[in-house]
C-alpha cells in the first residue's frame, strides 16, 4: 500500500498514475486543488507543513494501511539571492520540504513499527550537494533530509523499516517548467546523457528501494551523470 504526497505536481502525478496502472493501492494527497478525474476521487487534501492536518490524515487512513510505502513527493522552491530573500518565504521552504516531510514520517512510523514493515522514500535533489545560485532554502531543506534519514534508519532498522532519499537531477516534468528555456539548455550540457530524466527511471528506483531491505539510510543519486 502506497501513500504519496504532492500528486498534482509533475512527478507526483506521474508516479500516482503509474503506480495505479501497476495495480498498486495508492492513497494520494493534494494541496491547493483536487485534481479532476475518477482516479483522484478518494485523494485527500493535505498541507504537509501543518502537523495537526498530518496527524488527522494519518488517523483517518490508519486502519486501512498495510505494508506501507510512504513516498514524500510534495515540495516547493523559492528562487532568490540570499541577501535579497524574504525570511518568511525562506522558512516556508524548510517548513514544507524538511519539516513537513518529517511530520508525515513521524505520523506513519508508529503504524510501520506495529506492523514490523515499512518503506519511506523522500524525493531529494542534486541541488543539496551541487549548490545552485538562488536556491539556498531549497538546497538546505533537501540537504537536511540526508542527515534525517540516517538517524531514522538507525531508530527503525530492527523493525524492517527502511528510509532512503532519491537525489533527483533534472527531470522532464514538474519544477523544470519554471526554469527559463535558455537555462534549461545550459543544464542539459552538464548532464552526461544530455537529456532530462524520464520519470520512468524514478519509478524503477522506487521499485528497487521497495524490494531491497538491506538498503537504508541512503541517498541515491539519479541524475543521468550530472557533473
Ligand atoms: N522535477 C524535478 O526535476 C525535480 C528535481 C529534483 C527534486 N525534485 C523533487 O521532487 C518532488 C516533486 O517535484 P515536482 O517537480 O513534481 O514539483 P511540482 O511540480 O512543483 O509539484 C510539487 C507538489 O507539491 C505540492 N505541495 C506544495 N506545497 C505543499 C504543502 N505545503 N503540502 C502538501 N503538498 C504541497 C504541490 O501542490 P500545490 O501545487 O497544490 O501546492 C505539488 O503537488 C519535490 O520534492 C522536488 O523537490 C524534483
Image (cartoon, grey):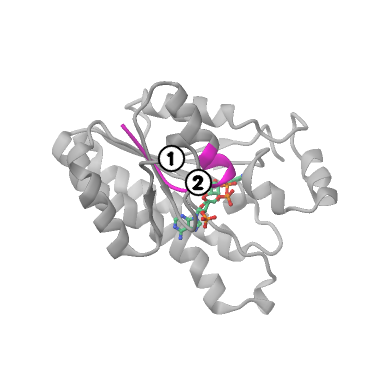
Q: How many marks?
A: 2
Between 172 and 36, which is closer to the camera in this rendering?
Answer: 36
The magenta-colored residue range is 1-13
Between 206 and 150, which is closer to the camera in this rendering?
Answer: 206
Question: Residue 85: where, in percent of width, then height?
Answer: 64, 76
Q: Residue at x 31, y 50 (%)?
A: 105
**Residue 174 on the magenta segment:** no
Q: Is residue 3 left or right of residue 78?
A: left
Q: Residue at x 50, y 59 (%)?
A: 141
Which residue in the protein does label 2 denote? 35
Question: Residue 100: where, in percent of width, then height?
Answer: 39, 59
Question: Residue 183: where, in percent of width, then height?
Answer: 81, 51
Question: Residue 164: where, in percent of width, then height?
Answer: 41, 40
Between 87 and 39, which is closer to the camera in this rendering?
Answer: 39
Callout 2 touching callout 1 (CB < 8 Å): yes
Please tell me in which quadrant of the rendered image residue 157 appears: top left
Amino acid at each position: 500500500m502506497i501513500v504519496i504526497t504532492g500528486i498534482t505536481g509533475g512527478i507526483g502525478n506521474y508516479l500516482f498514475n503509474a503506480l495505479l496502472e501497476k495495480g498498486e493501492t495508492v492513497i494520494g494527497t493534494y494541496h491547493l486543488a483536487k485534481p479532476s478525474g475518477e482516479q483522484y476521487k478518494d485523494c485527500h487534501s493535505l498541507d504537509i507543513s501543518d502537523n495537526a492536518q498530518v496527524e488527522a490524515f494519518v488517523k483517518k487512513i490508519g486502519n486501512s494501511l498495510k505494508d506501507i510505502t510512504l513516498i514524500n513527493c510534495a515540495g516547493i522552491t523559492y528562487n532568490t539571492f540570499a541577501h535579497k530573500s524574504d525570511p518568511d518565504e525562506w522558512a516556508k521552504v524548510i517548513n514544507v520540504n524538511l519539516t513537513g516531510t518529517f511530520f508525515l514520517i513521524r505520523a506513519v512510523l508508529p503504524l510501520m513499527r506495529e506492523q514490523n514493515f515499512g518503506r519511506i522514500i523522500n524525493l531529494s535533489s542534486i541541488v543539496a550537494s551541487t549548490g545552485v545560485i538562488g536556491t539556498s532554502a531549497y538546497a538546505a531543506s533537501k540537504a537536511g533530509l540526508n542527515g534525517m534519514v540516517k538517524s531514522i534508519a538507525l531508530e527503525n532498522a530492527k523493525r524492517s523499516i527502511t528510509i532512503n532519499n532519491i537525489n533527483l537531477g533534472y527531470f522532464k516534468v514538474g519544477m523544470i517548467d519554471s526554469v527559463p528555456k535558455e537555462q534549461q539548455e545550459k543544464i542539459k550540457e552538464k548532464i552526461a546523457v544530455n537529456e532530462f530524466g524520464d520519470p520512468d527511471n524514478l519509478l524503477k528506483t522506487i521499485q528497487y528501494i521497495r524490494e531491497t531491505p538491506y538498503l537504508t539510510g541512503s541517498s541515491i543519486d539519479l541524475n543521468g551523470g550530472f557533473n
